[in-house]
Image (tube, coloured by chain):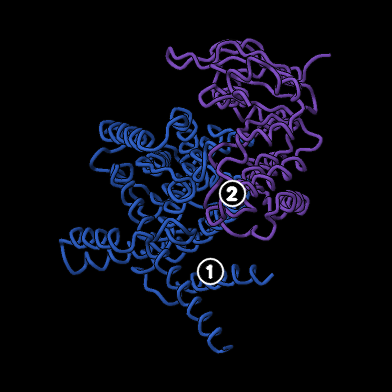
Chain colours: A purple, B blue
Amino acid sequence: MTAYLEIRDVHKDFSGLQVLTGINLAIREGERHALIGPNGAGKTTLFNIISGKYRPSSGSIIFRGQEIAGKPPHVINRIGMARSFQITNVFHELTVFENVMAGVRSRAGLRYNFFRRPEANSYLVQKVEDILKNVGLLDVKDIPASALSYGQQRALELGIALSTEPEIILLDEPTAGMTREETEQAIKLIDRVTKGRTLIIIEHDMDVVFSLADIISVLHYGTIIASDVPEKIRTDQRVKDAYLGEG
Amino acid sequence: MKAKISLILPIISVLVLLLLMPLVLKNYHLNILTEIIIFALYAVSYNLLLGYAGLLSFGHAMFFGLAAFVTGIAIIHLKGIGMITAIFLGVFSAFLAGVVIGSLLLRHKGSYFALLTLAFNALFYAVATKWHSVTGGDDGLNVPRPELNVIFAKIPVETVPQFYYFTLIVLGIVILFVWFFTRTAMGKTVLLMRENEERMKFIGYSTNLSRLILFIFTGTLAGLAGAFYTLHFRFVSISAISVEMTTVVLLMTFVGGTRTFWGPILGVFVYIILQNYLSDITDRWPLFMGLIFVFMVLFIPGGLSGFIMDMKERVAKKREVALEGNQL
């Protein structure tokens, strides 16, 4: 069976500093894939390369049969991939509604149109409201994103990622900075809204990782040292040495 | 529905008021009002860059001035040219300049963008100054106002009220379209550019294309204002394409405030009235204009429209507090 997203021998160095040293990863359609590893292992860099923010120094990435390595982010997004950011990255002075509408209308091809008003399209408005309802922000849709609480901003971050109806979604530490309770809520939310999509998630919280993921890959010094089902990862000696530690 | 009425009512009242102006105003003031409408379009187009997209340009006069010159030169050299053709040629030249310069600038932002626009403007200015045989250099060009033929009817635009109506109708419609534009998909995309260029890429927008489209659009609008500038004054000189002409629109926009659509229009109105008034009473009017702007930047950085919006909000809040007090 061919992989849905295949990363082949991806290297990345930043002016001599080797951050990724040959990443190979195959992700199947519908899989929930967690990426774990110590700080500085290259997880976010790998996300940045998959989503088009950076070009890989070498290697190739095949998504839905197309080579996407080195393509700009907006092209990769249109093929069906979306991502969230570790540090909240929303349109601060726009309303919550406008934040999500930006992605919804982009998906509908209403990006540069001079004559059509997205707000006048009830189909699009309905879609935005569905997403807002899904991430629990419908009540605050008319306030600027900057006025949201931290937890709400994280939910909006997720809402924006969902707004272009991606087939595959990359979440970069969606629960960063959350309390235990908030994290539990967020995980339920993520679990619900990513149903039917392929998910790659970077996460530090091991409870989250082990409860959510079908497959876990462990990144260590720019290379994947293990990639397997959670039970196997838990008992893998190399992973224990590198990351999980002796329990 | 209520929101719609509260939006459209002020627009209609202003339009009616403007249509009645020739009955009230003498030619001298009507001329000033015509100038205000021309600069209103110029400032509105500039604010799409500054206020809506967050791009500081020091080169907007290159579009304004280029179209002003092309319109003037076309009228002088092409015998029997009609007004519409002359305007079209001017606007089209600004459009082309937008395409070429926009393509060269679209990867730059912030201070690089500002400095590059300044450099391009200086280049245009240098060409206009040196190419004396075509542009008239420092002396400028006297440009007769050609005939306005719409289909087969000849519309008179010679007198001050006639040209005022012509300007009001054409530029009024364009300004209304720009207002509509700010609510369309592309208009909203411009806001995304200001708010978070990084993020918009990851939801499918090409920031380069967005920037190019905006640059061409605003350049073309400035060009239309420039064409009318030549027709209105029946004269064009290098001051139309100077960096000063950019700083003027920057000041007008800033005085009016960048956060609303109508702010720059208010800014133009205040700026031109003030300039006329001050220059009547003193030769040192630029000094007083300067002092007023320094005062504004220091104490009302949101511009006049920002100030008015703040006041409105305060009044609304007071009313709310008063209402709550009554309920208690």
Circle 1 packing at 10 Å, graded few (<14), some (14-19), many (20+), is: some
Secondary structure, mark 2, is helix
Along the line of sight, the residue nearer the viewer: B179 or A70: A70
Tell me where residue B240 sits by quadrant.
top left
Give the chain of mark 1: B
Q: Whole-percent x and y of residue B306?
A: 42, 63
Q: Whole-percent x and y of residue A156?
A: 63, 47
In this picture, is B271 found above or below B219?
A: below
| Residue B268 makes an appearance in the image | no
Circle 2 packing at 10 Å, graded few (<14), some (14-19), many (20+), is: many
Identify the residue shown where x is 68% and y is 28%. A34
Amino acid identity at mark 1: Leu
Tell me where residue B124 sits by quadrant.
top left
Along the line of sight, the residue nearer the viewer: B101 or A20: A20
Amino acid identity at mark 2: Gln
Q: Quadrant of the C terminus of chain B?
A: bottom right
Along the line of sight, the residue nearer the viewer: B198 or B134: B198
**Residue A153 disc label:** 2
Which residue is under mark 1?
B15
Side (left or right) of A237 relative to B82: right
Q: CA distance from mark 1 to mark 2?
A: 43 Å
Give the chain of mark 2: A
Secondary structure, mark 1, is helix
Side (left or right) of A136 relative to B96: right
